[in-house]
Image (cartoon, helix red, strand yellow):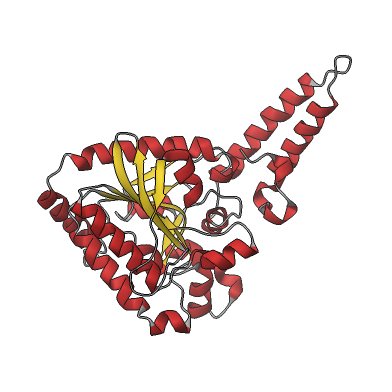
């Protein structure tokens, strides 16, 4: 659990600052309590006030505030969930064509009663690590590695669990020269036809085709404060309004939050996070994530491969279908 004292001013969001300040006061009072000086009554009152304030603040978050939570620098990343959920993880590297891409991590592991392929985007915790991971933005070799591993998992009927957390695919010159669009398109094609159960979980930021390349699965789950969108709010505001001040409006119009995507039929389930967000207690969030994945895997593993593929096909065919009716 991230304690208030461990959160620096740099990684505290403005709307959560009053809650963190209260929790810091509680920690200070606990430190001052002795056998002769008892602050337990004051501590209980402050704890009740902090819980009440947290509930009020998080009950009425805007879309842009949820974007900030999805990008929170202390938020658990894919490797954190691997440590909390998986046993005996063995990472596999390389696309067998160019090189390994650290922005996408993949390998086999034990998850409860299943042997699974775990695959997903990985961001860095500091500047050096972010340079190594390219801020979670994969290059073509990352998607080709993912495609190779997914085919391997399908060959042995191993379920696939994908963790989505990226601003988008890397748009650099080298990536374009090596076929970024083709690599993503191939990943979509391969995922649509795999004969094994697949689950995607958006754990943070699901941006553009870079996220979709790991999202053509039988179930799409989202953590409570994650986002999933064709473009970032900043990019949308820049294109539509040419005004960075419109970021909040862009976030609202993009319908990128978990409740929005459930209502649109894209997301299958919202997984509740720990109070205050996943960054406040990764273990609690992971426990809820485990229960959800187990539920969906049990359903999917009972289906024959042909039915899995057909249901997956129908799932994505229904997306974006609307009926226009003439006004009365």
- Quadrant of the rendered image containing residue 33: top right
Toward the right, the furthest residue is 36
Please give the name of the residue rendered at 29% of the width and 38% of the height, measured from the top-left corner.
114
The location of residue 233, given as percent across then percent down, is 51, 68
Which is nearer the eye, 305 or 310?
Answer: 305
Position of residue 14 in the picture relative to residue 260 (left or right): right
Q: Is residue 235 visible?
A: yes
Asked which quadrant contains residue 104, the reply is bottom left
**Position of 162 compared to 251: left or right?**
left
On the image, the x and y values in percent for residue 123 come to 52, 59
Q: Nearer the viewer, residue 137 or 250?
A: 137
Q: Is residue 151 left or right of residue 14?
A: left
Percent from the top left, x then y, of residue 170? 46, 73
Report the front residue among 2 and 222: 2
Q: In this orientation, which residue lies closer to the viewer: 299 or 182? A: 182
Quadrant for residue 58, please give it: top right
Tally the numbered discs: 0
The C terminus sits in image quarter: bottom left
Quadrant in which the N terminus is drawn: top right
Q: Is residue 225 visible?
A: no
Q: Residue 174 at what x, y percent from top left?
A: 45, 82
Q: Is residue 153 above or below residue 33?
A: below
Vertical comparison of 294 with 149: above or below: above
Residue at (54% x, 44% y) in the render: 278
Q: Residue furthest top?
A: 35
**Rendered residue at 88%/18% (across/down):** 37
Left or right, 281 with respect to 153, comes to right
């Amino acid at each position: 659990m991230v304690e208030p004292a461990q959160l620096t001013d740099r990684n505290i969001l403005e709307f959560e600052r009053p809650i963190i300040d209260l929790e810091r006061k509680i920690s200070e009072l606990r430190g001052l309590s002795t056998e002769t000086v008892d602050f337990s009554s004051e501590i209980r009152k402050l704890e009740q006030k902090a819980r009440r304030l947290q509930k009020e603040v998080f009950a009425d978050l805007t879309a842009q505030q949820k974007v900030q939570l999805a990008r929170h620098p202390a938020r658990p990343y894919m490797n954190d969930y691997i440590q909390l959920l998986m046993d005996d993880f063995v990472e596999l590297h390389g696309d067998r064509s160019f090189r390994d891409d650290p922005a996408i991590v993949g390998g086999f592991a034990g998850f409860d009663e299943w042997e699974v392929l775990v695959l997903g985007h990985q961001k860095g915790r500091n500047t050096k690590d972010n340079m190594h991971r390219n801020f979670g933005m994969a290059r073509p070799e990352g998607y080709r590695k993912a495609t190779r591993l997914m085919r391997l998992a399908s060959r042995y009927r191993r379920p696939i669990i994908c963790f989505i957390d990226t601003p988008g695919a890397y748009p650099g010159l080298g990536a374009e020269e090596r076929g970024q669009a083709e690599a993503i398109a191939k990943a979509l094609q391969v995922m649509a036809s795999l004969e094994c159960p697949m689950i995607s979980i958006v754990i943070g930021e699901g941006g553009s085709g870079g996220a979709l390349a790991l999202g053509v699965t039988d179930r799409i789950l989202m953590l409570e404060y994650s986002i999933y969108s064709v473009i970032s709010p900043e990019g949308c505001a820049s294109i539509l309004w040419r005004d960075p001040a419109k970021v909040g409006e862009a976030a609202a119009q993009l319908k990128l939050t978990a409740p929005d995507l459930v209502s649109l039929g894209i997301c299958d389930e919202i997984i509740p996070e720990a109070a205050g967000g996943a960054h406040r207690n990764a273990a609690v969030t992971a426990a809820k994530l485990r229960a959800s994945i187990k539920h969906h895997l049990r359903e999917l593993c009972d289906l024959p491969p042909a039915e899995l593929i057909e249901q997956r096909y129908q799932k994505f065919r229904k997306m974006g279908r609307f009926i226009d009716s003439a006004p009365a």
